[in-house]
Structure formats: structure tokens, C-alpha cells
Amino acid sequence: MMICQVTGSLVCSSRIDGLKYTVFRVVRDALGKPQAATDPVGAKDGDWVFLTTGTAARFAAGDYDVLTDLTICGVIDQWPPADIDDCQSPGSQQ
């Protein structure tokens, strides 16, 4: 699992059948790297979310037939902790 911040939506006008009608969000990790994730929970821009990867991402998407490798599992109510900046990963040294 990993923690990222939602930075926007990803719109696909054409897609393969394996993606069905999945909602996509752009997230950034602690290093600022953008990634596309499926979003079955309805996260909004600016939300901090936890995600899962690999086969677990397909289960978390709610439909094992959806071809995904990164899925948002939930929205974190309060993140980041006040003592770290929003680009620093938990447990890392400054």
C-alpha cells in the first residue's frame, strides 16, 4: 500500500473493454511522481488517499475483470501530520 495525493482527473475518450467504465484519477506520490489510478471510492482533488498495487488492485477496484495495477482504496481524513510537509513520505528523514 502507498499514500498519495489526488491531483486531478484523467479522461479517456477511447478505452479497451477491460477498463469498462472505470473512473481514473491522477495521484502523486511522496516524490511528486504522477500516476494514474482507478477510483472506486470517489476521491476529490486534493484528497490524500491510500492505494494498493498489483493483483490486490484488481480486487480493490470492485470487479476483478477490470484491468488495473493501481487502485484507490480509501480517502484519508487527516493527512499529512502537522510535523511533516506534504511532499515528505512518512518515516523519512529530512
Image (spheres, rainbow, N blue to C red):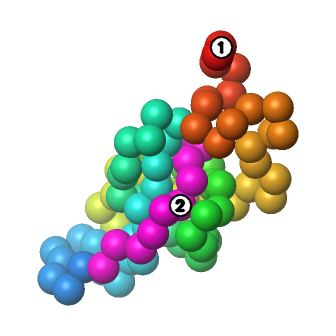
Q: Is residue 22 above or below residue 33?
A: below
Q: Residues within 10 Å of mark 1 (few under 14, many from 20)?
A: few
Q: Secondary structure at mark 2?
A: strand
Residue stretch in magenta? 1-11
- Quadrant of image for the C terminus: top right
Viewer-closest of 53 and 4: 4
Sequence order check, earlier mark of 2 and 1: 2
Nearer the observer: mark 2 or 1; the answer is 1
Is 2 covered by the magenta stretch? yes
Q: Is residue 20 above or below residue 3?
A: below
Residue drawn 69% across the image and 20% down it: 91
Q: Position of residue 61 (x, y in %)?
A: 48, 64
Q: Position of residue 21 (x, y in %)?
A: 35, 83
Residue drawn 34% across the image and 67% down it: 66
Q: Position of residue 92 (x, y in %)?
A: 64, 18
Q: Is residue 9 above or below residue 6?
A: below
**Whether residue 56 is visible:** no
Q: Amino acid at mark 1?
A: Gln
Q: Mark number for residue 93? A: 1
**Relative horizontal placement of residue 63, taking residue 88 as reference (left or right):** left
The residue pinned by badge 2 equals 6
Q: Mark number for residue 20? A: none
Q: Amino acid at mark 2?
A: Val
